Image (cartoon, rainbow, N blue to C red):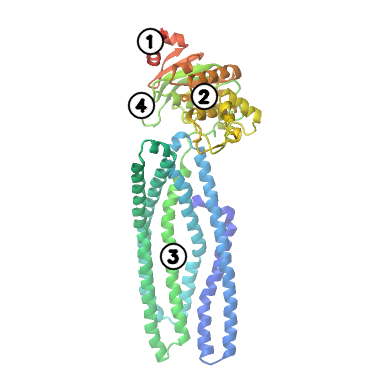
Amino acid sequence: MKRWFKYIKPYLAYFIVGPLLMIVEVLGEVFMPKFFANIINGGVSNQDVGYIVSMGILMIATSLLMVVGGVGGAYFGAKASINFGKDIRRDAYRKVQEFSFSNIDKFSTGSLVTRLTNDITQLQNFVDMCLRMMLRAPGMLIGALIMALQLNARLALVLCIAIPIMVAVMVFVVFRGFPRFKIMQEKIDALNTNVQENITNVRVIKSFVRDDYEKEKFFESNANLKKSGLYAMNLMILIMPTMSLVMNFSSLAVLWFGGKMVMVGTMKLGDLTAFVTYITQILSSLMMVSMIFLSASRAAASSKRLGEVLDEKVDISDVYAEQKDKQVQEGRIEFRNVSFRYYKNSEEKVLDNINVTIEPGSIVGIIGSTGCGKTTLVSMIPRLYDVDEGEVLVDGVNVKDYSLFNLREAVGMVLQKNVLFSGSVKKNMLWGDPNATDEEITAACKNAQADDFVRAHKDGYERELGQGGVNVSGGQKQRLCIARALLKHPKILILDDSTSAVDTATEARIRESFHKELKDTTKIIIAQRISSVKDANTIIVMDEGKITGMGTHEELLASNEEYQEIYYSQMDRKEAQ
């Protein structure tokens, strides 16, 4: 509860006024049966029309107050719960945005979506229910119980049997509900993950004709959710008939024993009528309490899952940065004894004792077999991952001493998986620089060899791109992503196998534009093709997380076996010689 109080505090007035207005409605409900009993006992029995009219006016006035209390309570309850949910959703989303890659790896995409939507909705609904019922249920229970005891204490003994039965049912619900709802939320995670994968990878699924297989996966996830949902909702199926049964038997017992009292003259008819209503109110309030506990059980499961997101320790931050105001000026990079593991307990190192210096404005190529740590190495520069051992320096300053904004603002990175967003080409380019002019956008696209195919479309830079850039080819997507990175005017530009879908002639023109337009930018090119890094000032050869060679193309071709193997596998040996 302490965790969530900070989300209640800004709207404390709503949290107080809403329940208080609900108490007004409850008071009206408690006194209304008494008024009705007075009409029967004092008005109908004595044929006193004036008394009936006066009590009727009092009942109408009470009803109007109940309407004000009920509507007002519901209004403020809704405002409180919706704002409560909004603030939690905002903070949870912000927290996810702060996650490093390793933080995100702990949660599936589907799970994060469920936690930021369904789980928050469960908490929000619980708060709304509490504001409407938390004071209403006990208020009605206590008020109706007092009124019933005043009318006839002997007849109220019926409750000594009914209340323990209902309390036992509530306890059963609470202890059985939490694990069931926790499982159900996990099944929603699995279903969301399945749907997300299917929609994102629909082209792969269709190209491999795996529609039926994916349908079966979805049907299985859907069936599992249905099964766990029914398993959880069986509590609802059990609780309502049980409560109704107890309520009906209690009313029947009151009518049986109360009727005998009326017949012998020890109880008035109006009092019996009011007593039946009070019994119904008492048992109804207990049903409300059971519904609160049931909702609490589901909210508790969601609360725990949300807590896991909010409590996740962000392992990359600039809280302890010593030079937050410092900006990257030159783009000099130095790796000193850098080692890294994806999992802290793993014995296998992804990077092992890396030492290399990259001078400002130079072009550095990194080449090596798949999985040798090339991408992981460059990810250390903008702190997408942090080193386990050693340090990474930019302009002589440890990257941990920069603010994350200043560091990443100085690094333009085109990842292996190129991502474009739905919207126009121009809007995608503005990700690189929100204030870029049309001329700057055009210049960046020309340098990335993207301007020609963009202008070839009738809408030009206003052409709408589908989600993920599905309506452009792989090579076009890569060139647009390069142009977007160039618009940052970065001091360090990292191209992670970002020209793999581009033909060699176009790639050569891109490299030529880099030489002319990005002389002061440090350029790091990760590639599988020798031709992509052949003209680099320095080529780094990596194998199994270690640097096995470093030099120019000619130097490595003469002395490095790994480089020779890659080179001759891509070139005709006779042509190479």
Q: Quadrant of the C terminus?
A: top left
Which residue does the numbered mark 4 point to in the structure image?
Answer: 348
Disc 3 vs disc 4: Cβ atoms closer than 8 Å?
A: no
Label disc, if present, on residue 299 of the rendered structure: none
- The answer to whether residue 337 is above or below residue 474 is above
**Callout in the foreground (1, 3):** 1
574 sits to left or right of 474: left
Cα distance in 3D space between marks 1 and 4: 36 Å
Mark 2 / mark 1, whichever is N-terminal? 2
The residue type indicated by label 4 comes to Glu
How far apart in space, not on screen, are marks 2 and 1 (Cα)? 31 Å
Which of 472/340 is in front?
472
* Quadrant hosting residue 110: top left
Residue at the image position 50 percent from the left and 57 percent from the top = 127
Q: Earlier in the sequence, mark 1 or mark 3?
A: 3
The residue depicted at 57 percent of the width and 79 percent of the height is 59
Q: Marks 2 and 4: which is nearer the front?
A: 2
At a point 50% along the width and 87% down the height, the residue shown is 40
Of the numbered discs 1 and 4, the one sitting upstream in the chain is 4
Local crowd at mark 1 within 10 Å, few (<14), some, or many (≥20)?
few
Element class at badge 3: helix
- The residue that disc 3 covers is 289
Q: Which residue is mark 1?
A: 573
Amino acid type of the residue tagged 1 in the rendering:
Arg
Q: Is residue 425 above or below residue 183?
A: above
Would you name the residue on which mark 2 appears?
A: 494
Answer yes or no: do the residues labelled 1 and 3 have beta carbons within 8 Å?
no
Q: Position of residue 212 (x, y in %)?
A: 34, 43
Q: Is residue 203 visible?
A: yes
In whole angstroms, how far apart are the C-alphas of marks 1 and 3? 82 Å
